[in-house]
Amino acid sequence: MLLSAALAGLLLCLGVSSSASAQEALGVHGTLDDQQEQPVPGVSITVTDANGTEIATVVTAEDGTWAVPLEAEGDYVVALDESTLPEGLVVRNCKPQLEVTVTGDRTALFPLDTQVDGCTPGESPGGGTPSETESGGEPGEESSEGDDGAAEDAAADEVSEVEGEGGATRAISLLVSGLHFGLMIALAAVGLSMVFGTTGLTNFAHGDLVTFGGVMALLFNVTFGVPVWLAAIAAVVLGAAFGWAQDWGLWSPLRRRGTGLVSMMIISIGVALLIRNATLFFIGGERLRYTEYVGQTPWDFGWLVITPKEVVTGLIALAVCILVGLALVFTRLGKATRAVADNPSLAASTGIDVNKVVRLVWTIGGALAAMSGVFLSISDGVKFDMGQHLLLLVFAAVVLGGLGTAFGAFVGAMLIGVFVQMSTLVVAPELKYVGALAVLIIIMLTRPQGILGRRERIG
Amino acid sequence: MDWQFVFSQALTQAIGPTMLVYALGAIGLNLQFGYTGLLNFGQAAFAAMGAYGLALSVVAWGLPFWWGIVVGLGAAVVMALLLGIPTLRLRADYLAIVTIAAAEIVRRLARATVWSDTTGGSDGMRGFSESFFALIPWDRGSTWSFLFVSMDNGRLAVDFGIFELQYSYRDTWIMIVGWALVLFFCGILALLVHSPWGRVLKGIREDEEAVRSLGKNVFAYKMQALVLGGIIGAVAGFVFALSRANVQPDTFTTDFTFYFYVVLILGGAARVFGPVLGAALFWFLYNMLSQGLSEAIRADVISPSVLEMTQVGPLVFLLLGLGMVLLLIFRPQGLIGNRKELLFDVR
């Protein structure tokens, strides 16, 4: 902070002095000081002309100053010999060489610090253009910025041209990838919504069940060398077991103790932190990939480019969602589940074992979340916080569809998935999640019960 | 292994600048969650409002420092109103989901490249704290000592014999201001919650319908609590930004909010000094664990094959998550809380 302020001050002085000294003799000079503004003596600085001929090598004086008189106007390279710097000091912007255009008495500054800032030492040995403000009022500054701007414009033109060419194709591709993403969200959302419906718990750890699936498949695939399809099945089974175990070991006892829903919600945050950091502990912070299906050649239909893995995982997810839906409507247990979600006390009084139903919901929810995790990882790789980022979209889907309803969660998930992907047509891709979360807030404002939720007391 | 060093470090941090950030954020949360029962999961966003309000005003718009403070507080109020109006009429868990989403929106907008010329994108901003540190009443060279407290070239050292606390020139100033703010807000909170206004808040937490039937405007009271808590959150953001001399979008993740909750529950929600106690204990435990483990690895007490240096951070947070779960299950009232005050529910 001090340093940049000092440099800004220097810059001001330079602006004044360079105009005042415009009529003086030709040359390059400067003062070398460190981050505490102590002068740095004994550093050698070499000035070469545009042809590479060395003009002079000087050593900075006790007060850190140095100067090289020149005979002709033109472009010169001022190079600081980093090996002569005192121990621990480096050129902060990694530009020990500056190209300067000399029309009078020029100043060349090297910002010194104990560590580099946003660059790698040894990079750009040819001497970057001195366009950074720290390097002093070099004349190249204005023009080089202009160049950058022009280059950016050109790049932007290129992009917009490409978009113009295949706008419709791009929209279809985004729609399809949105549907795929929506199915992945749906797998996670059904479980979250049903857990909420049956127990009232807003489970902030549900995203980490997704991560769990991805990591388990990674364990089987990479560590045990099992093919991905088998690893995926194993991960889903383990996900189901994990969901069952969570309810058996944690949530069911808590319900029996009569722990409040708010406490349980915060406990779920603790569980999320626990699972996420355990994942980080074991697999590290890198994005890891499975051994198969990584770089798949896409099918090109002209109007749509899609990878086979997307088609397969999407179809499986769709089939699973339909199966879950059919089971909820037609099987005895499915009907019981919906009854508990509707009104737990009434369901219990009709002879339904509520705890058994909740256990089932946790098991199915865990399995579906794990499946979502595996499928997402097949496309994008496994990362410890993948579930955390998905969780907010899952929430958005669940709220959009109506908290506590399985079908609402599915509809909401598809809408959110398509919305997230299609919004990149209009907004920057990095802001696509923002749009989805904004939708969540707008839904809250206008229709808090969601699309398929029933209007009841929620206030 | 240097236990004295580890212990000194942990104690230094337990009352240091970062602890003050957590204490302030949790005080705001205490008003919202502890006293009113509002599940604000976006306290990180309120802190971000403060930090970015200050940084943007000073760096991007060239306003004086004190105007930056005003802008930061104003941004927090606006944010509280925007979040509160749609959700405070709904059930508590809706507020939780909306605030968590809003916090994520704020973070993603702050790190977006679209306006990174102004906000610095994911690198954040710096260069706004000079006028704050220019206020330091003693100069960098001052040296004195009084009993076991001494100052050496602007650095403060408190030597207790078996352990020593050391603070840099700037940290000392942050701590003086920060502790003053903590005590100020604790005092305000103590007065507020023992006033009729505070009793209405507690009533809302226990039974909203009962309070409504007494003719109180529940929505207005909730909104006041949300705004006031958000302002205290913005102050936490100021201290956070100034103590680091920069703002970075990725420090304002939802995890930041979660640690506020850990701090609050650890100390005891619905107690005036709960957050302060919780922050000190949380930060002491965190530093004790991470410094102790790092030191143990360095001294070869734990072999690198068992635990690598880069795994210390995740392991400590894993243990903190586990601690949070166990705490809520077995002692939900924290250190000094009252169990009966925390039985409220969302339905």
Image (cartoon, rainbow, N blue to C red):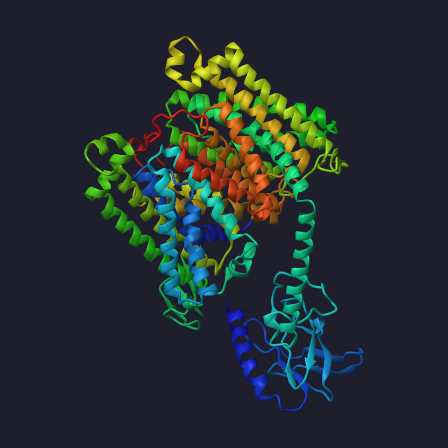
Which of the 4 image quarters holds residue A188? top right
Residue B86 to residue B209: above or below: below
Q: Within the image, what quadrant is residue A113 found in?
A: bottom right
Q: Residue furthest top?
A: A351
Q: Which image quarter is the C terminus of chain A in?
A: top left
Nearest to the observer: residue B184 or residue A52: A52
Does residue B299 appear anywhere in the picture? no
- The answer to whether A212 appears left or right of A395 in the picture is right
Reply above or below: B153 against B224: below
Task: Return the x and y of residue B287 as percentages of the image width and height.
Answer: 49, 48
Q: Is residue B119 above or below residue B89?
A: below
Residue at 25% from the left image edge and 47% from the top image edge: B190
Residue toward you, A86 or A175? A175
Tell me: A150 left or right of B264.
right
Say whether residue B169 is left or right of residue B337.
right
Q: Quadrant of the rendered structure where residue B117 is?
A: bottom right
Of A192 and A359, nearer the camera is A192
The residue shown at (51%, 9%) is: A332
Residue at image coords 66%, 91%: A25
Residue in view at x 39 percent, y 28 percent: A261
- Residue A272 in picture, x, y percent from top left: 51, 35
Measured as percent of width and height from the top left, residue B200 is found at 23, 38
- State the count of labels: 0
Q: Is residue A310 left or right of residue B333?
A: right
Can residue A68 be seen at all in this image of the molecule? yes
The percent position of residue B186, horizontal first and vertical second, equals 29, 49
